[in-house]
Amino acid sequence: MNLDETDNKILKNLLVDARLSSRQLAYKLGLSTVTVITRIKKLEQQKLIAGYSARLNHHLLGYDLTAIIEVTTGGGKMLEIEEKISENENICAVYDITGHADILIIGKFKSRQEMSEFIKNISAIPNVENTETHLVLNTIKEDFRLI
C-alpha cells in the first residue's frame, strides 16, 4: 500500500496519542477536519489501523517478569499449538520463527509461580517437544510502534 506524506503524518500522530480528536489532528497538521476524518476512515478500511489502545506500564500493574520462550514442535501441529498458546492473557506475542525452535513467545507474568504454571501447561500440549525460557533482566526498549 502506498502511503503519502499526509497518511504517514496522521499515523505518526495517532501512534503518539490515539486520543487526539480529528479536529485536534487537523489543526496540528494544518488540514481540514473532513480531510483527516476521510483519511483515517480510509486507513481503517485498508486495515492499516487495526484498532486503538492504551499503552500500559506493565511494571506498575505488577507484571515484573518478561519471558521469551522458544518452543519446538512436532507432528505438524504448530498452528494448533500457536492458537492454544495465544489464548493465554499473559502472552503479548507469538511468532513462527526460523532456527532451532519453531515458535517464539513473549509473555509477561506477575510471579515466578504464574510463569512456571504457564510453561508447564504449554509443555503438556501434545506435540510440544521442548521449551527454552529466557528471562529478561532489563528492558532497554520495548515499543512496537513503527513508522
Image (cartoon, rainbow, N blue to C red):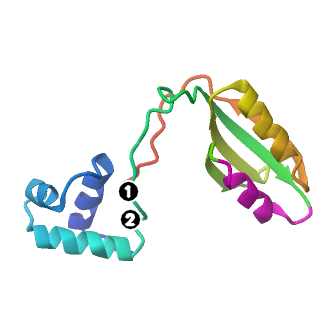
**Most frequent secondary structure within the magenta stretch:** helix
User: On residue 49, which mark appears?
Assistant: 2
Q: CA distance from mark 2 to mark 1?
A: 8 Å
Structural crowding at the residue carrying mark 1, measured as other residues with C-alpha within 10 Å and reported as few (<14), some (14–19) or many (≥20): few
In terms of image quadrants, where is residue 83? bottom right
Provide residue 79's location: percent of width, then percent of height: 76, 64
* In the image, residue 78 lies in the stretch drawn in magenta: yes
Please report the residue visible at 57 percent of the width from the left and 30 percent of the height from the top: 63
Provide residue 38's location: percent of width, then percent of height: 21, 75
Q: Quadrant of the C terminus?
A: bottom left
Residue 100 visible, this angle: no
Q: Are marks 2 and 1 in contact (CB under 8 Å)?
A: yes
Residue that mark 1 sits on: 52
* In the image, residue 52 lies in the stretch drawn in magenta: no
Q: Which type of secondary structure does the marked residue at label 2 adopt?
A: loop
- Mark toward the viewer: 2 or 1: 1
**Identity, as a three-letter code, of the amino acid under mark 1:** Tyr
127 or 9, nearer to the observer: 127
Provide residue 131's location: percent of width, then percent of height: 83, 41
Structural crowding at the residue carrying mark 2, measured as other residues with C-alpha within 10 Å and reported as few (<14), some (14–19) or many (≥20): some
Q: Is residue 62 left or right of residue 27?
A: right
Residue 113 visible, this angle: yes
Please report the residue visible at 91 percent of the width from the left and 56 percent of the height from the top: 127
Please report the residue visible at 68 percent of the width from the left and 38 percent of the height from the top: 68
Q: Is residue 8 left or right of residue 100?
A: left
Q: Is residue 18 left or right of residue 49?
A: left
**Identity, as a three-letter code, of the amino acid under mark 2:** Ile
Residues rendered magenta in the picture: 75-88
Q: Which type of secondary structure does the marked residue at label 1 adopt?
A: loop
From this view, report whether residue 14 is shown above or below residue 45.
Answer: above
